[in-house]
Amino acid sequence: MMIMKIKLKITAIVLFAVILFTAGCKKALEERPYTAFTTDYFKSADGLQAAINSVYAGMRYDYGPNGALGLMNMGTDEWTFGDQVLTGQENNFLELGTYKLAATNGAILTPWNRNYSSINLCAAILQYAPSVDMNATAKNVIMGEARFLRALNYLLLVQQFGAVPVDLGSGDLVFTDVAYYGFNRFPLNDVLAKDYNAMIEDLIFASQNLPVQRPANAFKLSQSAALSLLSKVYLFRAYSSVKQSTDFKNAYETAMELINNKSKYGVELLQDFGMVHKQGNDYNREILYSVERLPLNNLNNETPNPGSDFTGKVNIANNFFNCNYQGAAVIGGVSLIDDRPLPYGRPLRRFAPTPWIWNTAFADKTNDSRYHNTFRTVWKISTLRTGADLETFRNNLAAQGLKIGDTAIFLAPTDANAIALRAAGKKYKVLGPSEYYTNQNTTNNLYPNLKKYDDSVRNNFNDVSGRPFIVSKFSEVYLLAAEAALQDGHPADAVPLLNEIRRRAAYRPGLSDATLTARQNAMLISVGQVTLDFILDERTRELCGESLRWPDLAMRNKLVERVKAYNVDGAPNVQNYHNLRPIPQSQINSVTDADRARYQNPGY
């Protein structure tokens, strides 16, 4: 068995041999643990493939479970916490959302305890692959996958903690198969420079050696995903203390390589923003890379208890962004939604949007389709009842002049609209924006629900999702290129990129040509509007809730400014040192240096 410890703390890992099998037309990952294992296994083509599939599967820790969602979304201009957090059901989220963050917080352990093992496994693949007897192209693909995934694992650490070790015990980026108790983090700037250099070199290799296009029905890595991530890493380094003068230029040129050659790379912007996240369309050409999961396949998804597991490798995003719609609308003594219909998810109320979302970021709800394609504002009368119980429910509804499928709850876009609808005697619950739930206004536990992760194909209404979790989209590449153009001193080049995204956002099925053209024209911007804050707002409109926002703000040094401006729950405590998370206390405790405190990030 391969053991790797780092009292840093790469925990001991068991390598799982992973095979690919076909389930319908989708490729899936199946893990089979070996009771005995040596590094000789890496010296075969089967061993390399098993190892890289294990790293693919390991990405599930970073995309979908409780801790990962909290780290990437909570305490931003977009997201605060819902009432279940406020009342003590998730203290880790409360700490993240109020910036009373302790080094013992469980969420920060998600990348810390998982990603180093994947990084080390990638190093093993890269060490042994050159000597393996196999097709050269196939070998380079596996090495490209290893280098992409190593870079992504490093980025997920760097954007939370700053400088992290590249030496895990055997030298920089070298595979370690013995217990290691060091913490090679100094000098901080030197190590951070190594982090970025390693990510960039890995992604350049990946962008040249991965398949040009990803398979149509599987999320195997391709050059498009590598170019997207490479552009982002250049951009993030440009904002860092180890920036290089060409970083913004390289970020722009890398993104434009993908944009200008989208047919070559097999990617495109869909006509309809609403189709990008639509269930059943998970493998569309706008998605560059997602962490794979399969509907109703809890065994393959490594989710043994889908109704109760919040951690591990689950995707619980379908349940975490939902308000308490259950029992919220009662007409004539009849509860219009008295259980948890599969399309609406389990109302776990971990995340709630800030008022900035519905009042400002998505202020234009007419010309811009993205608000209604991002958030649920209408709930229909629904039930899980069957048999005689269902018939009784229908009769009770009929007595009120209602039926299943009628509107039960409507979150109106304006207070005036809500007042008018109530005055008209509508038989459903109507709230205006001033009545939506916030942690300062708890009368109505209703707010717009993120619906990008909706999953109606589950065995039970409490179950987590079996959908893939999006990591990168082609639309973000336009935003990266626009930002890089702005910061590199040629904002005029950002205008057509932003307008391409905004023009697409005007589309809604069924609009006449004249109406669509008018709305598209209303969405267009000029060079005088191109600022970093505008681009950050546009990122929200395009990417809201996609586990990007916290690093989006922190890496650009915009976290404090925007949390203070737009998140009343985080504003009182957020400070500049919160641009980094604390190194986990368990790691600090394991440092043998007498001066342990110097290993911690400032402020903690």
Image (cartoon, rainbow, N blue to C red):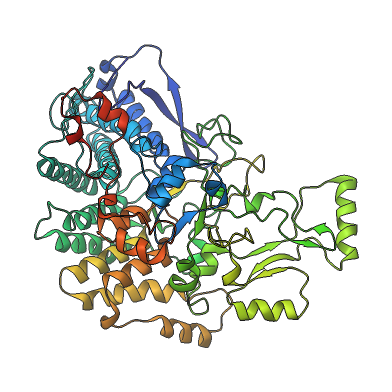
Q: Quadrant of residue 235?
A: bottom left
Q: Where does residue 259 sit, x and y in percent of width and height?
A: 29, 64
Q: Where does residue 363 sit, x and y in percent of width and height?
A: 47, 75
Question: Which quadrant of the rendered structure holds the C terminus?
Answer: top left
Name the one closer to the observer, 589 or 110: 589
Q: Which residue is drawn at the image coordinates 87% and 47% (left, top)?
A: 389
Q: Which residue is drawn at the image coordinates 87% and 45% (left, top)?
A: 387
Q: Is residue 419 above or below residue 151?
A: below
Q: Quadrant of residue 148?
A: top left
Q: Where does residue 575 sit, x and y in percent of width and height?
A: 29, 55
Left-right relation of 516 to 446 = left
Q: Is residue 550 visible?
A: yes
Q: Is residue 118 above or below residue 290?
A: above
Question: Which quadrant of the rendered structure holds the N terminus?
Answer: top left
Q: Where does residue 274 sit, x and y in percent of width and height?
A: 52, 65
Q: Quadrant of residue 409?
A: bottom right
Q: Which residue is drawn at the image coordinates 76% and 62% (left, top)?
A: 405
Q: Is residue 432 above or below residue 528?
A: above
Name the one closer to the observer, 250 or 212: 250
Q: Which residue is drawn at the image coordinates 15% and 25% (left, top)?
A: 593
Name the one closer to the observer, 295 or 369: 369
**What number of labels is visible?**
0
Q: Is residue 290 visible?
A: no
Q: Outermost residue, front direction?
A: 572
Q: Outermost residue, top direction?
A: 36
